[in-house]
């Protein structure tokens, strides 16, 4: 009998054929919906497969278990977030770091409010770790913790805005700070406390504008 908790290192197999890709996405959609309904602790691979209308064996063709399933959803969340942010950046072309920060926070908040499962699992588990999962810090990357992986992708997306020598470390610290403040914002208000969201923007704007000061 397969364990519901997968190995620490990702074991998922990327689908190639269109039918397999559709099943893969249905499984992630089902996982996201169940996260909103029952939370990560009560989430099971069996119920995820049932909700996605695929055999449980199909789920295990793609994922090593529950942890692997959550990691794949976190990765998809990040890809979609970066795609949304890139489109905002292309449309509005912010000239400076404060402009980039505002769009980055706004897109994150918008996904928290509207994307299934994102409130429970954005790029890492928001709630207390379920039994059997001892560390969700490396859902996105084997070597980097989740916030470091996101910071690296944001630096690439920002291009020349974050070319200063102090920016790699500053972005890492900024991610930790934003993570804490935005978790607090959504802990006190399901739509995100507007005052805390504004304070998060203000903190990041001032810190990242001159990271060496």
Image (spheres, rainbow, N blue to C red):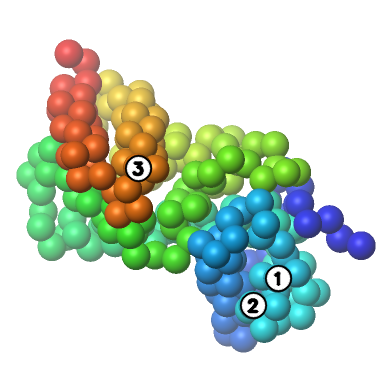
Residue beneath disc 1: 47
Give the mark nearest the N terminus, 3 or 1. 1
Position of the C terminus, as image quadrant, is: top left
Vertical order, 50 against 181 (above or below): below
Query: Dot 1 lies on which element?
Result: helix
Image point (16%, 32%), residue name = 202
Image point (67%, 83%), residue name = 53
Camera-side residue: 106 or 58?
Answer: 106
Query: Dot 3 lies on which element?
Result: helix
| Residue 139 x, y percent position in the rendering | 58, 46
- Whole-number angstrom distance, CA of label 3 to CA of label 1: 30 Å
| Residue 87 x, y percent position in the rendering | 23, 63
Give the left or right position of residue 22, taking residue 179 as reference: right
Vertical order, 202 against 74 (above or below): above
Vertical order, 10 against 24 (above or below): above
Q: Is the Cβ of the residue at disc 2 closer than 8 Å to that at disc 1?
A: yes
Position of the N terminus, as image quadrant, is: bottom right
- Whole-number angstrom distance, CA of label 2 to CA of label 3: 30 Å
| Residue 46 x, y percent position in the rendering | 75, 69
Image point (44%, 66%), residue name = 116
User: Mark 3 or 1, which is nearer the eye?
Assistant: 3
| Residue 167 x, y percent position in the rendering | 28, 27
Residue beneath disc 2: 51
Q: Quadrant of residue 100?
A: top left
Give the left or right position of residue 71, taking residue 93 as reference: right
Number of marks:
3
- Whole-number angstrom distance, CA of label 2 to CA of label 1: 6 Å
Disc 1 residue crowd, few under 14, some 14–19, many 20+, Cα 10 Å: some
Residue at the limit of the structure toward the front, as seen here: 188
Disc 2 residue crowd, few under 14, some 14–19, many 20+, Cα 10 Å: some
Image point (26%, 44%), residue name = 193
């Amino acid at each position: 009998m397969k364990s519901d908790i997968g190995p620490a290192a990702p074991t998922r197999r990327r689908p190639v054929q269109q039918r397999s890709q559709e099943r893969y996405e249905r499984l992630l959609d089902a996982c996201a919906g169940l996260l909103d309904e029952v939370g990560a602790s009560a989430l099971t691979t069996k119920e995820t497969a049932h909700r996605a209308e695929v055999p449980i064996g199909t789920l295990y063709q793609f994922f090593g278990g529950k942890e692997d399933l959550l990691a794949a959803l976190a990765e998809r969340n990040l890809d979609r977030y970066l795609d949304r942010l890139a489109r905002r950046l292309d449309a509005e072309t912010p000239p400076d770091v404060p402009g980039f920060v505002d769009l980055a926070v706004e897109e994150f908040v918008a996904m928290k409010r509207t994307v299934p499962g994102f409130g429970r699992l954005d790029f890492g588990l928001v709630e207390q770790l379920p039994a059997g999962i001892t560390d969700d810090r490396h859902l996105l990357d084997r070597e980097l913790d989740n916030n470091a992986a996101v910071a690296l992708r944001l630096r690439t997306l920002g291009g020349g805005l974050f070319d200063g020598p102090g920016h790699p470390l500053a972005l890492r610290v900024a991610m930790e700070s934003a993570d804490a403040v935005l978790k607090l914002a959504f802990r006190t208000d399901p739509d995100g406390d507007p005052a805390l969201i504004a304070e998060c923007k203000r903190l990041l704007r001032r810190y990242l504008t001159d990271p060496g000061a």
